[in-house]
Amino acid sequence: MPVYVVRNAAGANRSYSNLNEGFGKTLRFGANSPAVIERLKWMRDALAPALRAALSLMGPLELKPLIARALHMGDEGHNRNVAGTSLMIRRFAPALARAGVNGEHAAAALEFMHGNDHFFINLGMAAFKCMMDAARGAPGSSMVTAMTRNGVEFGLRLSGTGDAWFNAPAPVPDGLFFPGYSRADAGADMGDSAITETAGVGGFAMAAAPAIVQFVGGTPAQALENTRAMMQITLGRNAAFTLPALDFTGTPAGIDARKVADTGVLPVINTGIAHREAGVGQVGAGITRAPMACFASALVALARTGAGSASRRPSRKSSRSAPRSR
Amino acid sequence: MPVYVVRNAAGANRSYSNLNEGFGKTLRFGANSPAVIERLKWMRDALAPALRAALSLMGPLELKPLIARALHMGDEGHNRNVAGTSLMIRRFAPALARAGVNGEHAAAALEFMHGNDHFFINLGMAAFKCMMDAARGAPGSSMVTAMTRNGVEFGLRLSGTGDAWFNAPAPVPDGLFFPGYSRADAGADMGDSAITETAGVGGFAMAAAPAIVQFVGGTPAQALENTRAMMQITLGRNAAFTLPALDFTGTPAGIDARKVADTGVLPVINTGIAHREAGVGQVGAGITRAPMACFASALVALARTGAGSASRRPSRKSSRSAPRSR
């Protein structure tokens, strides 16, 4: 299966992702019917070679400025990627025309991307994974470097606790369902797309994307409020990703497990909702929260490393959180 | 010179526009150096034929849904057209690949569009002109159907006053200037792009485009406020063009000259700023207002048609405006 390769230009780490298959019945939502397999073969045999030919002419595509721009165009980078997809098509189209790709193949590749406003998300996820892996391994750090779900459990990692995962039962998301489906069809939260929120985008950047409430539910005011609330639990703001509607402040970035425990504010995750039975695929989209139990057990493990207490300066906040994390 | 042709699918009228040349020295901002002429020749000989070939495969491009979508992606349709341009490229790219256009020509056409985030505006203006012309000729109607400027005068037309133009001196816009230029370089307001505001987009839809303040000045809060203020002077809201940040309300549309006179609220126009001397081109972008004198003289002329008072139901508002418009 062809994959994107995303390199950290300022470090050694890389990340990978497959290409987005589109909506409805797709392998990533557990569907594997003949049509799903047929599409995957076409992606391998036609789409990926066309994109590869274009890339070899273009050189590497810089992802951070593209994502920053998409945030100024109403994407939040998780469940809304229409701008990212558009900007990606703009970059690839001229190179596809020039690369000598068969006209029909180039047209089919461009139509496939144009027909799927979520096409960019897989590349975005690889970019966010690459960013977050660069933050791994800081002794004593309570910064969350990964959040993910497998339909049964929700897991997260902290920078200061090595390879360990801290798990809790995955919540069942609520939101808006595609016609013919309801909450009774929803499986527990699934997928690795919560790497977007880990990187301070997605649910954390909903202030960039008032139109997303038509897809995940809620109101534009709640979208702004979600971003503001996330500022309580992050270590800082990402100056590279700014939010026009909040006077161009940076996205809240670097979830601090201690702040989550201190405030009780749980990370907001915009998520796709998979059917509870295999083979059906995505049935809706909505909002869920990372479970507190993951943060609690991660903080206990961090305290046991000893590095945290040594490197941490005393503060009102950390002394308040101490009883909970020991 | 090749032009877009925009047809009103629900009526008989058509409108036309040339293709956007890009930034800096361009014919539409009064520049006519050899480089400007060279680019116009390339547009005639390579760009337009490529787009025409694509269009003949695609069939007509529906503009209203495209513009509606761009408003959900942070465009206001006058000084911010990055989404409209992106969506246009997405539509044309597959057809260009399939139409058998020479690969190098197709690549150059796609690169030219990609290199100019304002490329869509000329097509948008033609769409807005087509919409507004459909509203011409309603007896007694005080709805504004055109606003335009020629660097000396500002002029407008009402639906109920036929072909007459009502003019006043064009204001000098204030805003943000490109490096090396200042307000002293600004010419009086110029161009027919105020057809966007006439159609309830541009300055009227700034609530869609918080990021535009980086180009025209002001704050995101003022952008929202501009849209809210325009709701005081329009006949209604356009249900086809909605504003996510204002809970998906429609754009304020159909400027009523009587409401302008009643409230003293002048239409907000996002505008490009041309250098006061010919040949230099655009030197900045900013915000200006339509002058009250145009509305006052238009209302006097409307009252003289007699149609207005006959068809107008008595109301507190119209009786208040009567002394001014007679």
Image: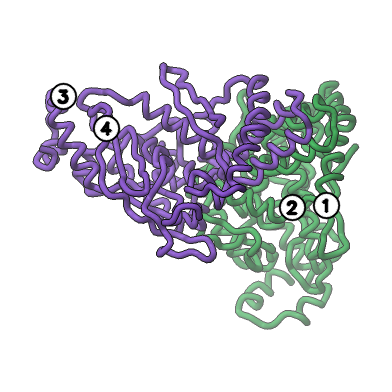
Chain colours: A green, B purple
What amino acid does circle 1 point to? Val
Residue that mark 1 sits on: A6
Image-quadrant location for residue A254: bottom right
Q: Seen from this angle, which residue lies furthest front?
A: B34
Residue depth check, mark 1 versus mark 4: number of the one nearer the observer: 4
Residue at image coords 66%, 32%: B45
Asked if marks 4 and 3 touch (Cβ < 8 Å), the reply is no
Task: Using the rendered image, report if marks 2 and 3 lie on a common chain.
Answer: no
Distance CA(mark 1)–CA(mark 3): 68 Å
Q: Position of residue A125 (x, y in %)?
A: 76, 48
What amino acid does circle 4 point to? Leu
- Residue B307 has which mark? 3
- Residue A63 has which mark? 2
**As drawn, is B172 to the left or to the right of B274?**
left
Distance CA(mark 4)–CA(mark 3): 13 Å
Q: Residues within 10 Å of mark 3 (few under 14, many from 20)?
A: some
**As drawn, is A51 to the left or to the right of B124?**
right
**As drawn, is A109 to the left or to the right of A203?**
right
Q: Position of residue A194 (x, y in %)?
A: 72, 49
Residue at image coords 77%, 76%: A308
Distance CA(mark 4)–CA(mark 2): 49 Å
Image-quadrant location for residue B134: top left
Residue depth check, mark 1 versus mark 3: number of the one nearer the observer: 3
Letter of the chain that mark 1 sits on in the rendering: A
Residue that mark 4 sits on: B158
B309 shown above or below B210:
above
Letter of the chain that mark 2 sits on in the rendering: A
Q: Quadrant of the C terminus of chain B?
A: top left
Q: Position of residue B29 (x, y in %)?
A: 48, 48
Task: Using the rendered image, report if marks 1 and 3 lie on a common chain.
Answer: no
